[in-house]
Amino acid sequence: MKINKFFFLVSILFAFFFLNQSLLAQSDFEKVKNFETRNKQLNDAIKNAASLDECNAIGENIAQLKSDFTPYKTLLDKSMYPDNFDASFVKIERSLEVRKGDFTQIVELKSEVGTLKDKVSDLSQQNQGLISQIRVLQIQTTKDASTIAALTKLVAQLKANIAQRDELVRGIVDSLLQQFVKTPGSLNDAQKQVVFKKVDNGNLFFNIERTIGDNVQFMKVTQMTPDDLSKMKIEYKDFNKTWRQIGPKLAEIYLTRKDKVSEIANIDNMFSDWSARINDEMWGQVNKLFREKKLAILPFKSGDQFVNSVNSFIDDEIKNYDVMGSSEAKNTFYMFADSVYFKSVKPVWVPLLIDNAMMTAANKDSVEKQIADWKEKVAPTSRMNYIYIAGAAIIIILLIAYFLKGKKKKVVYLDEQNEEQSSIE
């Protein structure tokens, strides 16, 4: 009986020991699992943090996690092999510092943007005042020297202001969006909120609209030179290229913000309108060159239209040649060709139009072929000119032959004299 009681006690002790070991193992597993869960939650919180304050709060939670599990460091080192307890905190703390750096940079950008916004606002007000003054001076029926000088000075100041304002707005775009390199689909909600804040704090859409509007107003109130238009075309291309890179990405991010989507679409339309106005101004000035000489050429707004208008005008001139008479027909031709096309259109405007894909080299060649054909009809090279040229050539040849013949005779005569002298001696 005593032996049976002994075995019974031993069995109970063994059962208690194994049960205790099982409970301890289960407790260790739960501790490791709990640590991993909280560590992952903190890493996710760092990625989704939307402000520097949130990052600071996460830092406190990391410190608390470290404090809570330091007693179990040995257990966690074994379960996290080849990593360890200390290495896991080095990683998460480094991630937090990187994220804090993002928000520190955003704060700096906000400060920079705020300064730029103030400058842009000042320039916008100045531009409006300059435009009003220019319009007042332009509507005066008579302009004395002082008025013209004042107008010239105001236009120059407005031009400089617009150039400076364009540069400032481009600076805002670059400052706010230089880090906007991820595709919109890869941005989480917190990152999208950062983009929203950047755009809103920089008043980005309004400033782009205002910049385009100022450039359009400048074209309306000033007489632009080919050089002005060339520079504005370059400015448009550079600005539009930047917008085409960021506009679609912003549109995708703002899918749920109808007001912003409409602003983005409006900016697209404004860029198109700006380009069309520059093109119209260029073609308008070319049209004006012909109108100033009272040449009734049909209006044109493209390279093909220019070719068709020139062809139509020249065809009419050739058809009416007999009615107008030789003298009037020649005057019209020389006015068109020498006073307009070859003097101003070809050297000044054609290269600019071709460089901006508004006209092709084939268009230019077609126009000049028509002018050459027109010249053969109304002012052909006289046949008498060919006769004079041929006669002059014959005379030149005869003179050369005569000169050579005379030189040859002189050489023979000298040789004979030398022979006679030799025989006397």
Image (tube, rainbow, N blue to C red):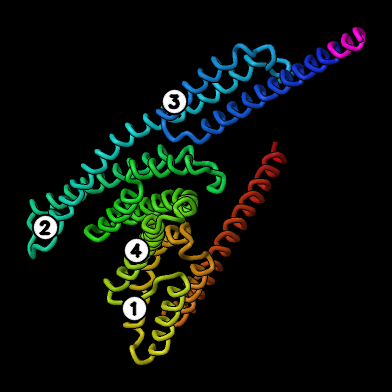
Above or below, 114 against 137 in this view is above
Tell me the quarter of the image containing the C terminus.
top right
Identify the mark nearer the N-term, 4 or 2.
Answer: 2
Circle 1: element type = helix
- Are circles 3 and 1 on residues that touch, CB within 8 Å? no
Q: Amino acid at mark 4?
A: Arg
Residue at image mark 4: 277
Q: Which mark is residue 97?
A: none
Q: Which mark is residue 57?
A: 3
- Seen as rendered, the residue at the extreme front is 1
| Circle 4 Cα neighbour tier, 10 Å, few/some/many (<14 / 14–19 / ≥20) | some
- Are circles 2 and 1 on residues that touch, CB within 8 Å? no
Circle 2: element type = helix
Chain part drawn in magenta = 1-9
Residue at image mark 1: 332
Q: Position of residue 288 (x, y in %)?
A: 30, 69
Q: Disc 3 vs disc 1: which is toward the camera?
A: 3
Residue at position x 31%, y 48% from top? 207
Q: Position of residue 365 (x, y in %)?
A: 52, 69
Q: Position of residue 323 (x, y in %)?
A: 35, 92
- Asked if residue 251 is among those painted magenta in the image, a careful observer would answer no
